[in-house]
Image (cartoon, rainbow, N blue to C red):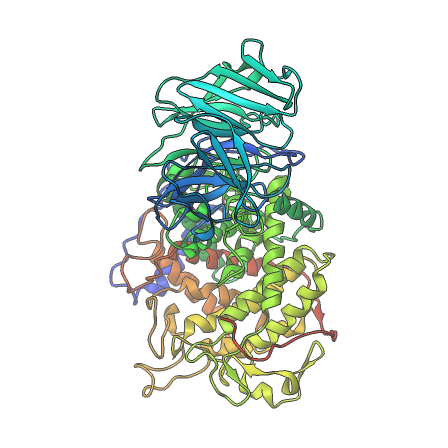
Amino acid sequence: MSRSARRGAALASVLALTATMLPVLSVQAVERAPRLPSLPTVPESGKIPAKPRSVPAAGSAATGRWTTWSGGVGRNAGTVTSMVPGGGVALLADWNGDGLATPGRYDSGQWFITNAAAGQPGWEAKTSFGGSAGDIPVVAQLRRRGPARIGIFRAGTWLWQGPDGKVARTDQFGAVGDLPIVGDWDGDGRDDLGVVRGTTWILRITGVRGRPGFVGKSLEVTVDRSIRAAVVQFPFGVAGDVPVVGDWDGDGRDDPGVVRARREWILSEGLKHVRRTSSELHQLVDGEVPLVGSQVTAVSGCPTATRKGERYGRAAAKKVERALTPKGTLGIAGNAEILATVQDSLRYVVTNDLTARLRSRVDRPYYDPLSTHRTQEESVRRSANAALAAAIMLTTTSWSDENGISRQQLLDYARWHIRSLACEHGAITPGGWGNGWQSALWAVTAGQAGWLLWPDLSKQERAYVAAMVVSEADYAAARGPRYFRNRLGQELTPGDSQSDEVSWDLMAPALALAMMPQHDHAARWRNSLIAMAISAFARPDDLHRPQVYNGVRLDIRLPGTNANEDGTVTNHGIVNPDYIQNVQHLWWAASLLRSGGQPVPEALFLNADIVYRALAVVEFPSPPYAAPGGTVYQPLGQIYYPMGVSWGVRRPATFVGVDAFANAYAAADVRAAEFLAAHAADTRALQLRWSDGHIYADGPAEDSYRLGREEYALQQLALAWWAGALKDGLRMRVDTAAYRGISLGNGTPIP
């Protein structure tokens, strides 16, 4: 069927279903995407550099904003670290020896630091040192390895702090009024001293008996053989310039630089040809001072990656097996509407990202997602949802040009999100997102997108995705099951079942196991997946019936429950359909394993059918429930909330995903196919009110989820299409084997 025919069929069914529901349905032709900006590509890099490369940076203790600009590709790209505003002098140094320079500040003898390179970390009080009037803080790499040392420049005297907090070393170099600088002038891995006097640079190079060969002939050199040191002196810059020092060209030696007029960075090529310079423009604002950051990996890689993180990711990526991705089908009722809605919704989300939400970042290969919004949930989850939808369309359809978006544009867009999100995960970037509340869900969403597009990713992108997935799987496995009620029926987390958190956590080991079945942690992931699948929607009756799932005897070993006896889930103090819907995580996890060609543990199907019946079959009489009563799923795709709702009453896309999974896995008598078609049609009807492809009207009535409702709807629709593709397109093997070492936890919730 042609695209126009599909749309015509979808529109006809939508109008038929919604004629009695919408008093006015103004249908407009969906616009083609406007001319979209091209996203940057990232060239493949080889080995990880032996030493960090210096990059321009800026910071302000008063505002708490530190920015580090990337070197090489995307020179105008910056990573922002947002600190609590404070007093004193802004600093940037490698405080823990991982190679990355991170924020610090010196305030009248008090030193504060963070080892985080992104996000919104808090200050850590490091030490007390200095504090006399006129003291200037200095930080240097005095050893080849390890963290930077802190010191004070006091009128020509350099005082360095030792491990005991006292002065461990004193140097004499410079005079009153000089500006102290440090740099590894000779490339031996240790910093030497220097001062800037007016526009004259005076550098001391230790460990030499003659004129260094890397110093240009035009520079004045004085050698003191008795102390094996040379002093190099030369003019550089003009009055008003601020001196900066860094290894700008990656040759292992630090070179002079100046910042002029708070905007232009003039960087020397080295002491051999000190007057050969390059220039970059980075504007300083709001009282910022120029600083020097570091980039440990190749210039085309994640700018905040540690060497350890990248190596870890590269090793994990070698174990990844490609996903199996059958094509979607229009043979499932509702799929024509789903496909058309996803195509138009992608048009809206891609256009909105590239021309509005992320407009100022489209020239950045890594766009620093953690600084895009106030919360990590909005910054990460929103982009991950968009990336997964794009990846599903690219791999399960013959996408060529839909709404003016070409296949290459959509691929570039998906990769841009994937690498940026994975780059700033804590497995790669210190202080990055992850290993916390809901992060397993975000990591699986972004990680699945990367896995589906694995053949199209670069070596760096694969490394970052693999590291993110392994990290979240390990964290979720260690966290394990939690429970709403104990065996006596007492609520451990009053009013809030743990089913949602446990069910999204289990998807992380499921994805890791699907991607890397031969990984050293595979057995741990499988056991934790089984344990959390058993606990996620365990019901009171499970405590008394002698059921066995993957070797676990439930009535003996279950320490608690998360679902009510009828399959409903309590959250926010009410029976909550939006949380009953989370049963899709069990089926989503099963589908991930099928995509990896792996057997599906039988535990993933425990109570899933019963929980879905709480949406489709269970009756809620009124009273005591809200009028009009009945089942959650109402005619024409409407949703009934027996005890109210938190995010609006007209959000059918929220349930399209679970319907599609139920259509693939649940018993036929739950009528999942009918509900899928109805919710897909209602979603399409909502979308056809507008010409730009978005779905929901402003305000609280339909969907008030302000942290990315359009992207969430898009993700659910795309998942529904993917579930339909897997339904008959991939063979499923159910794993009934008994496994040792499965821990169901003790029922105590983890804060």
**From this viewpoint, which residue is outermost toward the left?**
23
Q: Is residue 266 above or below residue 672?
A: above
Above/below status of 733 relative to 64: below
Q: Residue at x 28, y 63 (%)?
A: 700
- The residue closer to the viewer here, 678 or 93, is 93
Between 226 and 347, the one lying in front of the other is 226
Residue 728 shows in this picture: no
The percent position of residue 359, horizontal first and vertical second, equals 38, 39
Identify the residue at horizontal 33%, vertical 57% (top origin). 696
Q: Quadrant of residue 525?
A: bottom right
- Whether residue 235 is visible to the viewer of this picture, yes or no, is yes
- Residue at 45%, 44% in the rendered image: 104
Q: Residue at x 61, y 43 (%)?
A: 146
| Residue 741 position within the rendered picture, expressed as x and y whole percent measured from the top left | 71, 73
Measured from the top left, where is residue 587 in percent x and y? 57, 67
Return the residue nearer the eye: 473 or 212.
212
Against 63, residue 433 (above or below) is below
Residue 90, quarter of the rendered image: top left
Task: Name the spot of residue 421 as percent of width and height, x first.
Answer: 51, 48
Give the farthest residue toward the front. Answer: 226
Q: Is residue 31 above or below residue 195?
A: below
